[in-house]
Image (cartoon, helix red, strand yellow):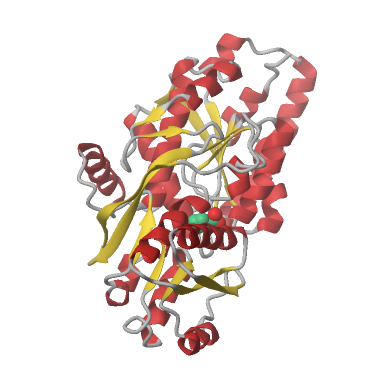
Amino acid sequence: MEYWSNGVVGSEIRSQHAITPTPQFPEEENVKVDLDHRLKYLAVATLAATCMLPISPASAQSQKARVGLMLPYTGTYAQLGTAITNGFKLAVAERGGKLGGRELEYFTVDDEAEPAKAPENTNKLVQRDKVDVLVGTVHSGVQMGMVKIAKENNTLLIIPNAGLDAATGALCSPNIFRTSFSNWQPSYPMGKVLADRGIKNVVSLAWKYGAGEEAVAGFTEGFIKAGGKSVRGLWIPFPNVEFQALLTEIASIKPDAVFVFFAGGGAAKFIKDYNAAGLRKTIPLFGSGFLTDGVLDATEEPAQGLETTLHYADGLNSKRDREFRTAYSKAYTYAPDVYAVQGYDTALLLSAGLDAVKGDISKRKELIAAMEKAKIDSPRGAWTMSKAHNPIQDIYLRKVVGRENKFVNIAHKALADPARGCKL
Ligand code: BEZ
């Protein structure tokens, strides 16, 4: 009874997004898709009720694998969602459009980086579209909603960005994998970098939501452990970008340095405002690499010299990375960033699982086992999965030179998230 006519529904209701230089997913498209879905579901439900014909395992495998992309395509994190989608589709295209011998059918939802809409949006893909695998998302608050629903429904979920510590910590689960980072991971090594430079008193500033709080906690842990003295926390609600009052406060506190968590459009604005406030020359600014990744075309001079830590860098100079960058730039006409790499690696991980079961997603145990032991040959450098399903990876210190986050050195080799509370 596992093979009732879901596959028939999918092949009729949604077309595949081709790779385009700048994929656009306007809000109207989702509205239209919703209507299309409802009409076609009515027709298919009638057909299914009349026929009730089971689909054999063999024919299920010959159908397309249903991939639900739930990412932000509008708002502050829109560029991140697009880069992840681009990276994912590039890896699939490099495999002839198939993973584990199966073509993919994409179902796309714009989550708008809006946590309140996460349950409804996730259910569109899980309940309505009956996807085989969920890929998402970027924002940790939205991720919390996705994780809960993926756990309740035992849906395979691959997280291509959001760092929500609990996803591979207290809420870890056999069906949940992450190809990006935990929020703790890229920030923790920056603590030691600053302490080793003799910096004692830091002001942190971040968006007040899970990712900002966990990034600051990771940084503080590393900083105090390595000899730093104090971290005073300043906060601003997400996705607010009115930084002026906070910059005035930083100027009056006069810390040795500032550590921030911002990303996407908000990060670009912060870099420019920090410079315009005259702080760049007097109080050095640091951050996890989301501050400067994917924003350097927009920030230019004010970003020059900024140092950050992240699991990707420009100028890694490996053959693997060079090939990836050439292919990505050719496909999309602009250079890749960390988000593109994470999307690419998400498809590599899914490919490792599907190859092992020759595309038969119903062989869940074998699929998961293969994903757990996969060694991902990533542009960022090869990485493996921790027991909690989070990458064990090198964290790089980078410095902005021109439009690049230039590799400086390895800030922490093969860093594994502590996975606090994970019982896997
Ligand atoms: C997060 O919400 O987890 C996140 C968003 C953007 C960049 C990094 C982390």
Q: Is residue 418 left or right of residue 391?
A: right
Residue 18 visible, this angle: no
Q: Is residue 276 above or below residue 92?
A: below
Q: Residue at x 48, y 66 (%)?
A: 262
| Residue depicted at x 74% and y 35% | 152
Query: Measured from the top left, where is residue 291 in percent x and y?
Result: 41, 65
Along the viewing direction, whichever of 123 and 318 lies nearer the viewer? 318
Considering the image in quadrants, where does the C terminus appear? top right
The quadrant in which the N terminus is found is top right
| Residue 139 rendering spot, x and y as whole percentages | 57, 55
How far from the left and from the top, in percent, is residue 119?
A: 71, 48
| Residue at position x 49%, y 44% in the image | 160
Q: Is residue 229 left or right of residue 237?
A: left
Q: Is residue 32 above or below residue 227?
A: above
Q: Count how many numbered circles sit on residues in the image.
A: 0
Place of residue 295 in the rendered image (x, y in percent of width and height, measured from the top left): 37, 65
Q: Residue furthest right?
A: 49
Does residue 206 appear in the picture of this structure? yes
Residue that appears at 47% across and 41% down: 416
Q: Is residue 413 left or right of residue 71?
A: left
